[in-house]
Amino acid sequence: MAFAPSENWDLDALFPGGPGGKAFNDALDALDAELRDLVRRADALPARCHPSDLASVLLHLERLSEHLEMIGTYAGCAVAADAMGKEALRAQSRASDLGTLYARAAVTPNARILHYTEAEFEVLLGERDLAHMQNYLRDRRKLGRLRLPEAEETLANELSRDGVLGWGELYDLKAAAIRLTVDRGNGPEELSPGQAQSLLSHEDGGVRTRAYGALQDAWRTVYPECAKVLTHLTGTRQVLNDRRRLDPLDEPLANARVERGTLEALMEASRRARPLLSRYLKAKAKALGKEKLDWTDLGAPLGTAGGSNAYADSQKFIVEQFGTFSQDLAEFARRAFRDGWVEVQDRPGKRGGAFCADAPMLRQSRIFMTWGNNARSTATLAHELGHAYHNHVLCVLPASQRRVPMTLAETASTFGEALVREGALAATRDPDVKLRLLDATLADGVAYLANVPARFELELALYRMRREGPLEADALEAECSTIFKRWYGDSVAAVDPTFWASKLHFYIGEIAFYNFPYTFGYLFSALVYEHFRPQGRAGAPGYVSLLRRTGNEWAEHIAADALGVELADPETWSAAVGGLERDLVQFERLVGA
C-alpha cells in the first residue's frame, strides 16, 4: 500500500448526505420513535414483573444502544470537523436529546432489578437470552444505591437535558467561538484555541510565548461564562449527590469500575513520583540554559526530530512498529488509513484535541486530530489507533460486554503509543534524536503523574468551593494556581492560572471527574506493556484476551487474574513508573545533568 491517503475522513459511510441530510435525520427520527415506545413499555412493567418481561426490555435497550452510539459518533465527528456549523450543532443537540431519552428508558428496568429478591434475581440471571448480560445485571444491582427512588430518578434524568448537559453545550459554544491572533513567523494569523494550543510545542520559543499569551488573553474574555457554567454543573451534581447520600467520587468510581482503594493507591504512587518528575524538569531547564522552566518551556522540544513526520511517512512507521508485536494490529492500522477513518487536516474551524469514536454497527471507528508534522502528532495517531483497535477486538461481543470504562479504555491506546515510541528509540543512534524522543516520553510522565492528578484535586475542590457559594473566576484562578504549584513544585517558575477555564474536561455534562482515569490508564497500560511486550508476537493473543475483558469486568479482577498484581497496593503503581526512571537516567546522561 502507498501511504498517501486523504487527510480527511469518510463520514458518508456512516450516514451519507451530511448532518443535515436525509439519511442521518431519518435515523434520528426512527430512533426517537423507537425509544419513546420503549419508555412506554418500560414504564408499564409492574414493580415485581416477570423476569421474561424484563428480559425483553433489557434486550431492546441493548440493541438500541448500538444505534445510539452510531448517531452520537456521527454527530460528534460532524461538530468536531465544523465546530460552528449550524447543521453539525443541530445534529449534536438532537443526538444529546436521544441520549437523555435512552437514559430515561433505562430508569424503570434498573429499578425493577433492585426490586427482586435474591432468589428472583437468580431467576432473571437464568433467562437464556440474558446469559451474556450476567455481569452487566450484577453491576446494575450492585450499583443500585447510586440511584434515587424511581420517580425522582426519572425527573432528574429529564431535567438533565436542560441542566448539566445544556450548561456543557453552552461552554462548547463559547469555546468554539474564540478566535485569537498569533504570529507563527509569517505575520499575524487568526487561529482557533486548538490551533494555538498546538503551538506550545513549537520549536521557536518566541512562537510558544506569543501563543501562550494569546491563549491567556482569550480565555480571560470568557471567564464569567466559564465560572457560571462550573457553578451550575457542580451545584447540580452536588444536589443529586446529597439526595443519594453519596460523596462526589462514589458515582465516578462506579462508572470507572474501580474501587476506592485503587484510586487512593494510584494517587499515592503519583505523589511518590514527584521527585522523579522534579529531576526531569530540572534537567530540562539545564538543557534549555535556564534556572527554572517557564510554563511555555514544558512543551519545548529538545534535540532534533530526525526522520520525517509527514503524515504518509508516519503512517508507514506506525504500521511497521505495530507489526513487531501483532500482524493483526498492523493490518488493522492499514485498513484504517486505506478506508478513510482518519481526519488530520490542519485548518480553521475544527475543534482542538484528538479522539477516537466507535461506529459499532459498521465495526469501524473514526479518528480525529490535527496534524502538526512532529513526533507528537505521530504518537497521537498511534494512540488513537490503539483506541480503534480496542473497539475492533470488542466488536465480536454483545453490546452489554463492550461497556469499557475510561480507566480501561486507555489501555490499548497507550500500548500502541508505546510500541511506536520504543521503535523510534531503537531506530536511531543519533543522541539528538534520542533526546527528542526521551523528552517526549518524560513529558508524558509529567502530564499523567502531575497534571492529571492536579486536575483531579481541582475538581474535588470545586465541590468544597460550591458549598460556600457561586464559583467566581478570581477564586478559581487562585485555587488552580495553588494546586498546580503543589504538584509541579519549584521546578517551574509559574503555572497556567487559566487552566480551569481552558480545560474542556471540567465542562463535560455527561460525566464528572474526567481526569483520574487518564493516570490509571497510563500506569495500567505500562503494567500491560511490561507483561506482554517481552513475549513479542506470542504475547498478542493474551493481550487481545485482556482487552476483551475490559468491557465486562472490574479493573481489580482483570489485573489480578491476567497480570497477577494488586491494584489497591501503591507499590504496584510505583513499579509501573520504573520504565520512566530508566528513560530519565538516559535523558540526564544526554543533557549532562
Image (spheres, helix red, strand yellow):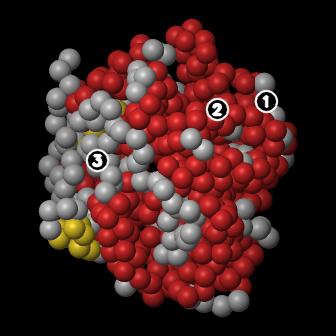
Q: Where does the image place residue 368, in percent across and percent down from the top left?
A: 32, 46
**Which residue of the protein is positioned furthest toward the top in this rendering?**
538
Three-letter code, disc 2: Arg
Mark 2, residue position? 582
How far apart in space, not on screen, are marks 1 and 2 (Cα)?
21 Å
Q: Residue at x 42, y 53 (%)?
A: 300
Mark 3, residue position? 372
Q: Where does the image place residue 70, in percent across and percent down from the top left?
A: 36, 45
Q: Residue at x 62, y 61 (%)?
A: 491
**Which residue of the protein is positioned furthest toward the bottom in this rendering?**
469
Three-letter code, disc 3: Gly
Q: Earlier in the sequence, mark 1 or mark 3?
A: 3
Three-letter code, disc 1: Val
Mark 1, residue position? 565
In this rendered view, identify the residue nearer to me: 231 or 579.
Answer: 579
In this rendered view, identify the residue nearer to me: 115 or 399.
Answer: 399
In this rendered view, identify the residue nearer to me: 327 or 448.
Answer: 448
Give the vertical position of 568 relative to 125 (above or below).
below
How far apart in space, not on screen, are marks 1 and 3 (Cα)?
38 Å
Mark 2 lies on a secondary structure that is: helix
Q: Which residue is drawn at 58% across and 35% down?
A: 589
How far apart in space, not on screen, are marks 2 and 3 (Cα)?
28 Å
Tell me whether circle 1 and circle 3 mark residues in contact (CB < 8 Å). no
Q: Where does the image place residue 235, in percent across and percent down from the top left?
A: 62, 80
Give the vertical position of 159 relative to 134 (above or below).
below
User: Mark 2, residues whose alpha carbon is within 10 Å: few (<14), some, or many (≥20)?
Assistant: few
Q: To which quarter of the image does residue 551 belong? A: top right
